[in-house]
Image: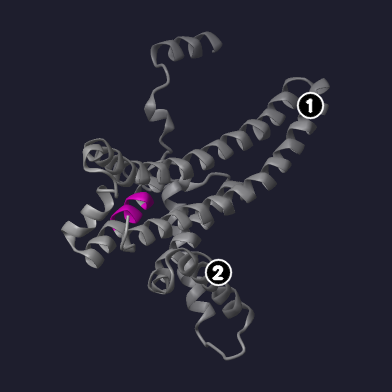
Amino acid sequence: MIGQSTVLAAEFPPSVEDFYLPSILPWGHESYWFTKITFLVWLTVALIILFFLVAYRKPQLVPSKKQWMAESAYGFVRNNIAVEMIGPRGVAFAPYLTSLFLFIILNNFWGIVPLVQISPNSHIAFPAFLAIISYFLFIIVGIRHHGFVKYFKTALIPPAPWFILPLLIPIEFFSNFLVRPFSLAVRLFANMFAGHMLLLVFTLGGFAMISENVWFTPFSIVSWIMTIALTLLEFLVICLQAYVFTVLTASYVQGALADEH
């Protein structure tokens, strides 16, 4: 059996396809897209919608616990991110920024939930899609506020001597319109992917060592203790990355609304 497995491994080496999760639906090839990751994203959206529907089903002057939690989440993003970064005009963007913050933090949170232990944001497609939304948001906001020509003139032409502009304009274009969405997506993806891999290494490593030799039990215990410590650290990273992504989106909107470069 071992020899046969070795032969099969030699004939069929690992490929990119090994990184795609299998479908969790039992029927048909057409259901290949509905994986564990897809289910978690849908569940996240459903939980956020359900939470706010329940919290504001019967709003009261003296809020209930659910209403207080919903108002606190919205108030935190509105006051500490939207208004703080954009100014009074940030109130108009608070609903989107709140939705973005809660969507990211809850999707990140799946990475430390027992028996789930994977975040949809550890797959580059989801951070990339969120970055694209933020990318088009600040561009559209800038065009609506300034007009097409004035916005790109403000974004691309810094106040500098004319003879240095041929060097600065490509740099401004690269930093403002290419690096921003790339850095947003990669920062979130890399942190979630790295955290997921570290938790897997120490969790599965503990089981592997104890099954290999009973004398490795102390090392297995240390490995599981490291898993607990890394889970606590990952919780901080989860909150921080959701906050950073939302703050950067707000800062890009603020830059698009600014009258000067």
- Residue 114 visible in the current orientation: no
Query: What amino acid is found at the position of numbered circle 1 in the picture?
Result: Phe
Residue nearer the viewer, 223 or 30: 223
Question: Magenta segment, which residues?
Answer: 130-136
Find disc 1 in the rendering and name its residue: 219
Q: Position of residue 25 (x, y in %)?
A: 40, 48
Please name the residue shown 20% across and 59% down the image.
150
Horizontal side of 171 relative to 88 (left or right) equals left
Instruction: Specify the color scheme.
Output: one colour
Q: In this view of the protein, which residue sits in the foreground, 105 or 84?
A: 84
Q: Residue at x 68, y 26 (%)?
A: 208
Placement of 226 over or under 246, stated as above or below = above
The mark tally for this picture is 2
Across and down, in percent, residue 41 comes to 44, 54
Task: Please tell me whether residue 30 is drawn above or below residue 145 in the rendered image.
Answer: above
Which comes sooner in the sequence, label 1 or label 2? 2
Query: What kind of secondary structure does the magenta stretch mostly adopt?
Result: helix
Query: What residue would you read off at disc 2?
Result: 76
Horizontally, residue 261 falls left or right of residue 75, namely left
The vertical placement of 139 against 61, above or below, is: above
